[in-house]
Image (cartoon, helix red, strand yellow):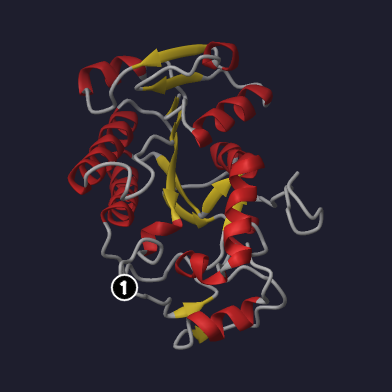
Amino acid sequence: MVTGAAGMLGREVVVRLVADGHSVRAYDRVAATDQADEAHEVIVGDLRDETHLAGALGGVDAVVHAAALPSPLSDTEHRVFTNNVESAYHVLDAAGRSGIGRIVNVSSLSAIGLAWARRPVSPESVPVTEAHQYVGEDVYGLSKYVGELIAATVSRRWGTTVVSLRFPFLGTGERLRHHLARVHADPGADAATLWGWLDTRDAAGAVAAALTRPLHGHVLINVAAPDTTALVPTAELLRRYHPATRIDAPLDGFEVPFSTRRSRELLGFTPVHAWRTTKGTT
């Protein structure tokens, strides 16, 4: 079952999983007009309705939880936080309680707390690993951080494997082109997110890998493209916008300042879509 299946990432995940030969149950508060052509089954409901959710999980072998309000600007702060946290708890706990053996929790690199900060915040060190402490103040980043705590708790409580994937900005096509144009005009516009990005189709590929790799417990993984969104070398960007950040390893050229070692080693994942080498998007 894929939650948030009508959303930007959810729809790509459904398409990818069906292409990989999985039977997919798409779950969302609304049904996309063409969703019935992509998924084997479509369920419309609210993830905060525990009774409805329990029924929707029947016969499911794995869950991808991609549903969320995607930024602190999506609604009031209270609604963003409560929606994201309640839905994560209900989905993950119900799946674990039902004996479902694998859950992929779509998290965000915003869970570190940099992306939506109202005051300038820099990472302690780069490359930023999964062990970086939470330094946030916004409700969206907090909701995703709490979602990871829920994932770890569910894994311990029910013995299920939960893989939390921390994604950066996701986009393809026009959405990505618009984002790149903004960053190229002003690299500072992406300083809070450390110029990270990932094609939405690659994000779906990472989800597919996280469903099948031999992992155990709660596993937290950064997933990002190997390069940045910027036309300025990464070392120069860091000197300009994050001068107090400690650099623990050389960042050559346009290398992204997030550690993606775990995504390579644990997921066997390498992005295949690029913008820089094609002077556009693929």
| Place of residue 154 in the rendered image (x, y in percent of width and height, measured from the top left) | 30, 42
In this rendering, position of residue 95 left or right of residue 101:
left
Give the residue drawn at x 55%, y 15%: 34
Q: To which quarter of the image does residue 208 belong?
A: top right
The residue closer to the viewer here, 175 or 55, is 175
Give the residue drawn at x 45%, y 58%: 109
Whether residue 266 can be seen here = no
Residue lying furthest front = 185
Name the element at disc 1: loop
Whether residue 218 can be seen here = yes
The residue closer to the viewer here, 29 or 247, is 29
Give the residue drawn at x 30%, y 39%: 88
The residue wearing badge 1 is 119
In this rendering, position of residue 150 left or right of residue 127:
left
Local packing at callout 1 (Cα closer than 10 Å; few below 14, some 14-19, many 20+) is: few
Give the residue drawn at x 39%, y 39%: 160
In this rendering, position of residue 27 left or right of residue 92:
right
Residue lying furthest right = 278
Residue type indicated by callout 1: Arg
| Place of residue 100 in the rendered image (x, y in percent of width and height, measured from the top left) | 40, 29
